Amino acid sequence: MTRPSLRLPYHQGTTAHVSSIYPFSVQGSFGHLGTYVGLDLLAGGGEFCWDPFEAYGSGLVTNPNGWILGEPGNGKSALVKCLLWRQAAIYGSGPDGRWFGIVDPKGEYAMLAEHLGLTTVRLSPGGTTTVNPLAPGPSTDHEPEDKQILRRAEMCTALVGTVLERALTQLEDAVVFAAVDQITSSPVIEPTLADVARLVASPTETMAERLRSTDRDLAAETSTVAYALDKLLSRSLRGMFDGRSTVPLRWDGPGVVLDLSAVPLDSDALPLVMVAAAGWFQQLMACPGPQRVQILDEAWALLRNRHTAGYLQTCFKLGRTYGVANLCITHRASDLVAQADDGTATSKIAAGLLADSATKVVLRQAPDQLDAAVAHFGLTGPEASIVGQLTRGRALWKLGGRTAVVQHILGPGEQPIVDTDARMHGTARRGADAA
Ligand SMILES: Nc1ncnc2c1ncn2[C@@H]1O[C@H](COP(=O)(O)OP(=O)(O)O)[C@@H](O)[C@H]1O
Ligand SMILES: [Mg+2]
């Protein structure tokens, strides 16, 4: 018996047209490991799956860090929210699954936090939530006292340096260190920034001896530091970081959302809040634990300041050591260089951060940003032209040396988690009225 064959009418065409049906122009699949993201448009619309740890495990990328770039409203946050939601479904959440740490400057992760049971820490100047960046964290057991002193002193100098908008002088730096050293070796279990400020304003004899100065001279010379700390505690950060923590820093949950929406995005206080909050978060990230995913939404705000940019740098470097995947979200490629307040130092950190992230997801960029995207994300000419024409939810993914164009597909029930347009179409008001 002969096999039935497909009979088609004879067709003749030129190579210009027939090349479009060349079957081998479709690339292979990236595999099924990770969570479903959407359709891989360069692989014939097949499924595209991704997970930072799986991609690292399979050798596709050399580190678990990534940047997500795109004009506002194109679906950057929506992509991240769905990825976390789906990761929790596949890998579980909490100590036996994934732990999520989210820095949320717009307060838009509330619904996801509710669905995943994440603790939301809402910081606002003069508010009721206090976080103590000097509190002993879960890493205390793994952290010798000298390391703890260094971490605390680094945090205090970063805060003072941010207020003064300059690096500290040697003596200023030394006095902060001496105050932190003194308070850490004292019997006080949970020192606060207010304790450090008190010691800096009136140094003890031990501190003066150590700095080879009389205590009155010392106080006069370091009054700038004392004023800066006072400004922090009584004005910019009032109520947020000046006392003992009112929220526990714990592992045994699925994660934490740091809601910073009460601090205006362009205010002087935001970099300070980010420095202090980052120090608090760092304690969780820099110790062994479950696989963690840290999300830094609107990361351009972190890149405005040398200290917060330095925090990102530490996170990226420690990512592999402690099993943390860092995902930063920002608008434009030029954010990575233009935000720097002190010229080259911060720009260099930003350039290093990009180089240290093996995964780059680029959503639509405005025409004037394409050159910057090509320069900083290493896009080819055809890739850049794709990026200029992408529609909402569609992104160019660069994974190690490979490229995909992926349409993120929202699942049934995911729309309310990702919806940031509610106010535009009036559903937020109706929802609030109904509640
Ligand atoms: N893949 C998608 N499919 C359908 N709607 C989407 C998709 N991605 C995002 N959206 C919608 O677009 C709006 C803006 O998305 P958002 O993630 O907040 O943008 P961005 O973070 O880039 O500013 C949201 O209300 C969301 O519901
Ligand atoms: Mg967003």
Image (cartoon, rainbow, N blue to C red):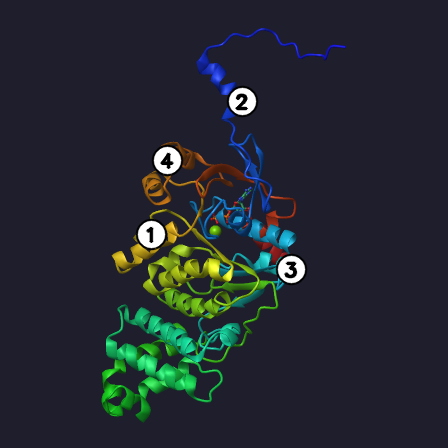
Q: CA distance from mark 4 to mark 2?
A: 23 Å
Instruction: Give yes or no for contact between labels 4 and 2 (Cβ–Cβ under 8 Å).
Output: no
Instruction: Give yes or no for contact between labels 3 and 2 (Cβ–Cβ under 8 Å).
Output: no
Frontmost of labels 2 and 1 is 2
Q: Amino acid at mark 4?
A: Thr
Q: Position of residue 218 (x, y in %)?
A: 25, 87
- Residue at the spot of label 2: 23
Q: Considering only order in the chain, which callout, 3 or 4, is on the residue closer to the N terminus?
A: 4
| Residue 281 horizontal side relative to residue 434, left or right | left
- Residue at the spot of label 4: 380
Residue 169 vertical placement versus 343 (above, below) = below
Q: Considering only order in the chain, which callout, 2 or 4, is on the residue closer to the N terminus?
A: 2
Regarding mark 1 in the picture, which secondary structure is present there?
helix
Q: Residues within 10 Å of mark 2 (few under 14, many from 20)?
A: few
- Residue at the spot of label 3: 435
Frontmost of labels 4 and 3 is 4
- Residue at the spot of label 1: 351
Q: For residue 6, which quarter of the picture?
A: top right
Q: Quarter of the image containing the C terminus?
A: bottom right
Instruction: Give yes or no for contact between labels 1 and 3 (Cβ–Cβ under 8 Å).
Output: no
Q: Quarter of the image containing the N terminus?
A: top right
Frontmost of labels 4 and 2 is 2
Rendered residue at 43%/88% (across/down): 186
The residue carrying mark 3 has its beta carbon less than 8 Å from ligand 1: no
Rendered residue at 37%/44% (across/down): 377
| Residue 82 horizontal side relative to residue 267, left or right | right
Regarding mark 3 in the picture, which secondary structure is present there?
loop
Q: CA distance from mark 3 to mark 2?
A: 55 Å
Q: Amino acid at mark 1?
A: Ala
Q: CA distance from mark 1 to mark 4?
A: 18 Å
Q: Amino acid at mark 2?
A: Pro
| Residue 82 horizontal side relative to residue 19, left or right | right
